[in-house]
Amino acid sequence: MRIAMISEHASPLAILGGEDAGGQNTHVAELSAALAAAGHDVRVYTRRDAVDLPVTVRSPDGYDVVHVPAGPAEPVAKDALLPHMRTFGAWLVERWRGDWTPEVVHAHFWMSGLAAVQAGRQVGVPVVQTYHALGTVKRRHQGVQDTSPARRIGYELQLGRSVDRVIAQCRDEVGELVRMGVPRSAMTVVPSGVNLGTFAPLGPAAEREPGRARILTVGRLVERKGFQTVVRAMAHVPDAECVVVGGPPAGLLETDPYARRLRALARSCGVADRVRLVGAVPREEMGRWYRSADILVAAPWYEPFGLTPLEAMACGVPVVATAVGGLRDTVVDGVTGDLVPARDPRALGEALAGLLDDRIRRFAYAGAARARARQHYSWTVTAERLAEVYAEVAAVHRPTRVVA
């Protein structure tokens, strides 16, 4: 099939770790690669954010990345992109009326959905929507700190009622969408996957201090990822070190406000000598860091899905995570890891200390984690399931009804 991926702010070519570069970038890149490997013609459309970017870049993984001129050719925070989505959609219409028209469009994030349905309606192509995050959940957890456009939740509901299929990534998201008013019949649950070639137990590992347990935590340095909870929890985990991977490159950590706050917090908690920030790490090197860890900790306040626990599990690393969002699906409590309440440093610290002290349980979790990742979360399987959805909506070929 000819498949168009729309990912307006999250380019699959971006360097991970920035404020708006994380799981969605990885998801779009890996899914596109898996679909291309299965023989599909995949093109990813993302906003042009630099003047020197060519219109089209061929990925080494066999799909094209097309840079759409919508808004200034410079970085723009994703919450400021909404005014440019009409231009984005109009450009797609003009492009798709040429020599390459997709058979299905898969939009990633709600603003991508607005551009996708604008173009899909005019060209007569069905649209599939993955939200990756929901405004209702963000508003609930961030309150007045939520910088999303005021109409986000209304747009998300309209999209859910109008696109040809909604792809939910976990059971928690299904519940959220139903409470919003999206019909359950419009949804298909297809979780994200993990690259089992990149993430595996065997291979080189990052250096570590002999005799000291390593707790690893990975993600963008933003408030909701819960890194402050992890730092506070380290007071309850004597002798172990905590390595934080993510954020800007190592040389820029000193000027990053959140990194400075984490370091100040570590000093105030008396664990500064055991908390290490390493900054952004190239994706191809992440396996080394996972394999160096005794435990992967993921402590977000909320998490639509969460790829880093899956990557650690595929490397045979047990996970201690907060019982939120998609983590309640991927991490099986008491089997592949432990689940704890969000924003509870003591509960997190006690879970980490208990698991480090129980070598037999830790090894059992590691084996079960690897098996679960391999059996249920291969990108190949994810791509196959989505290709079936694409074929279903393309067969119906019903134009979407939403007005962006």
Image (cartoon, helix red, strand yellow):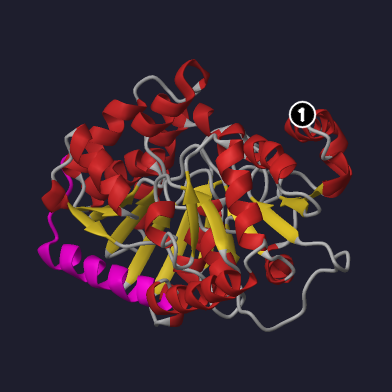
Question: Which residue shows up at 37% across the image and 37% down it?
Answer: 134
Is 396 colored magenta in this rendering? yes
Asked which quadrant contains residue 154, the reply is top left
In the image, what residue occupies the spot 42% across and 44% down? Answer: 324
Q: Is residue 172 above or below residue 72?
A: below
* Residue 15 in sight from this viewpoint: no
> Which residue matches tag 1?
261
The magenta segment is 380-404
Residue 91 position in % (x across, y down): 42, 44
Q: Residues within 10 Å of mark 1 (few under 14, many from 20)?
A: few
Locate residue 192, reporting x and y percent.
42, 62
Image quarter (top left, top right, bottom left or bottom right) of the N terminus: bottom left
Q: Amino acid at mark 1?
A: Arg
Q: Is residue 371 left or right of residue 258?
A: left
Q: Secondary structure under badge 1?
A: helix
SS majority, magenta: helix
Q: Residue furthest top?
A: 144
On screen, residue 138 versus residue 205, left or right, reads left
